[in-house]
Amino acid sequence: MPVATAEMASVPTKLPMADRIVRVFDHCFSDPNGLNTRLRGGFCEPYYRPRGEGQTYHQVEFTLDYAASALHEVAHWCVAGEARRQLPDYGYWYAPDGRSADQQAEFEQVEVKPQALEWIFARACGLKFRVSADNLENGLGASDRFKKAIRQQVLDYCDTRPNPRACAFAEALMKEFGCPIPFDRGSYQLADLS
């Protein structure tokens, strides 16, 4: 997989954070003969749009110009397998804000891997990671169990490495932002999760 090159690094770094993340992602994954996927911001809601209906590439869409949203949506894209990447929004269910405690527990179960990758990506570009319980209406924040599961998944990724897409993106972010290697177990402490 391509990673950041000297040519990419020569572009001025005065770009907003989200624009730099888009540039890194597109450099790694937009090749029409490869994964043919682009990352785009400016949307009211995040969404994954597979190629089709006049669009010649897959598109990962994130909220407005939020760097954290970009990283989170890329994490979902990295977790999704080939078949899911052919489906709108990966074919996932989504219960909006206001979930019950049982729905929240199910949400947390499916969010462990994406949020673990998001933490790695955030570390790779020098951003603080915040756990997303995504359920403000009912006041159900992230459970301690969820935070521990995310950290354990990050530690597992540090030991065994995630899939090649996630590794390529993390390494390209690290080069773009000049941050330390994001697969250092000692960089991830439970106390850092908010």
Image (cartoon, grey):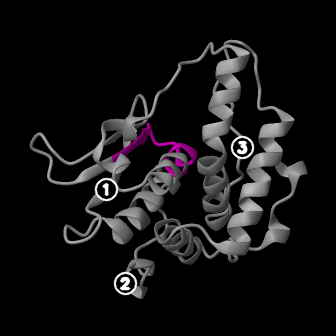
Residue drawn where x is 41% and y is 58% of the image: 22
Badge 3 is on which residue?
130
Query: In the image, is residue 180 part of the stretch drawn in magenta?
Result: no
Percent x, y of residue 140:
76, 20
| Quarter residue 19 falls in | bottom left
Give the residue type that dot 1 points to. Answer: Arg
- Which mark's residue is nearer the viewer, 2 or 3? 3
Crowd around label 1: few <14 · some 14–19 · many ≥20 (10 Å) = many
Disc 2 to disc 3, C-alpha distance: 32 Å
Residue drawn where x is 77% and y is 64% of the image: 155
Q: Counting residues from the N terminus, which is met first, the one under dot 1 or under dot 3?
A: 1
Viewport quadrant of the N terminus: bottom left
Vertical arrangement, residue 137 with respect to residue 177, above or below: above
Disc 1 to disc 3, C-alpha distance: 24 Å
Q: Is residue 59 left or right of residue 114?
A: left
Percent x, y of residue 31:
25, 70
Stretch of the chain drawn in magenta: 60-71
Report the front residue among 118 and 146: 146
Residue drawn where x is 49% and y is 55% of the image: 16
Badge 2 is on which residue?
7
Query: In the image, is residue 64 part of the stretch drawn in magenta?
Result: yes
Dot 2: element: helix
Crowd around label 3: few <14 · some 14–19 · many ≥20 (10 Å) = some
Q: Counting residues from the N terminus, which is met first, the one under dot 1 or under dot 2?
A: 2
Badge 1 is on which residue?
38
Looking at the image, the residue that sits furthest to the bottom is 6
Report the front residue among 192 and 145: 145
Percent x, y of residue 162:
59, 67
Q: Counting residues from the N terminus, which is met first, the one under dot 2 or under dot 3?
A: 2
Percent x, y of residue 180:
70, 76
| Quarter residue 62 falls in | top left
Vertical arrangement, residue 64 with respect to residue 51, above or below: above
